[in-house]
Amino acid sequence: EAERSEEDTSVLVLHKDTVEELCKRKIRRIELQRKQEELFDTADDLKSKVWHLAAAVKQAKHLVVYTGAGISTAASIPDYRGPNGVWTQLQKGRAVSSSDLSKAEPTLTHMCIKMLNKEMLVKHVVSQNCDGLHLRSGLPRHALSELHGNMFIEVCTCCSPVREYVRLFDVTERTSLHRHSTGRRCCHCGSELRDTIVHFGERGTLEQPLNWKGAAEAAKMADVILCLGSSLKVLKKYACLWCMNKPASKRPKLYIINLQWTPKDDLAVLKINAKCDDVMSLLMEELHLQIPVYDRAEDPIFNLAAPLRPDDEDSHTRAVIARHAGSPKESSFGEPGGAAEATAVQGGWFGRGYGKGRKKKKTA
Ligand SMILES: [Zn+2]
């Protein structure tokens, strides 16, 4: 203001509406920036917050956990909206490699959640992740709702009931928004198989692995909801997960662990700004529980997986999970510099939503 000339000032006065509008926009821009920032609690704050969280976990009658991409970032699966998230990268025109996706393994957080469920402290897990890591951590299926599908599962919807095929590789190589055929066929009826992924703008109707029934029942019973590593931007739209039909005082208490702002922050009893793995290891210490170590040889996916039909042996190029690291089966796919490494993600669960955004831009 001090640097304005008389002329400047008179111009500003003359265009009062424009000035007001610009000020409003600036405030909105700053607010938006603030919401995207990743914040970290100090070590002392974190410790005292986790103490409160532990008390809530112990006292809860029906604790339900909601998880998002933030719990898988330690498994080298990037999140969507963080500074290094898939969308941020794609929007900047950078290629996102698919090479490590199938090599990802359950994180410390996945293993803690599995343990908390075993100890009956966590009743149900609702995840928006498609990476299948909850299942692979050993969490029982009845305690899990994978609302947006599972990248390792393809189904035959012509068989009744729907027939499920768990695979040891990412089945979504050829799929994208509204295109769900995986290119393989059902062993029983010969129909085309489809993936289970629910893209933005789609409505998931499959019973499994989505398990909406389990999710809605869990939310109805919940007295505490713990949200881990989710921006909640998508989850908040699912009204049944938040008991919005109950009066505010009867709704479950919300605990949120996320580095960025979420639209539920103001409703939360406690917001922890820290990495999920850091919070969970402190929490397990408070609860005097051991953190199980993921052992690939014990990964339930090997018992669930169905063998491919001979015709489908060469139906994909994605890396195959092998029970023992470095087995020849594993190394024949996805070698560094090999075809799988070089392929930037186009469709599949990983690039989901992005294609839609681009189309919109074009028509605009
Ligand atoms: Zn079939």
Image (cartoon, rainbow, N blue to C red):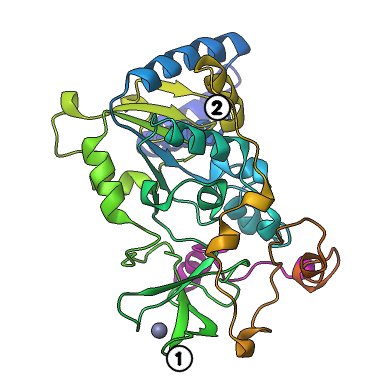
Q: Judge by depth and name the residue closer to the eye, 354 or 19.
A: 354
The residue carrying mark 1 has its beta carbon less than 8 Å from ligand 1: yes
Q: Judge by depth and name the residue closer to the eye, 231 or 341.
A: 341
Are circles 2 and 1 on residues that touch, CB within 8 Å?
no
Q: On residue 267, which mark appears?
A: none
Classify the position of the C terminus by image quarter.
bottom left
Amino acid type of the residue that numbered disc 2 sits on in the rendered structure: Met
Residue placed at 58% from the left, 42% from the top? 82
Which structural element holds mark 1?
loop
Whether residue 11 appears in this view of the structure is: no
Residue placed at 65% from the left, 67% from the top? 345
Q: Quick check: 164 left or right of 344?
A: left
Q: Is residue 144 magenta?
A: no
Q: Is residue 359 magenta?
A: yes
Whether residue 164 appears in this view of the structure is: yes
The residue range painted magenta reads: 341-364
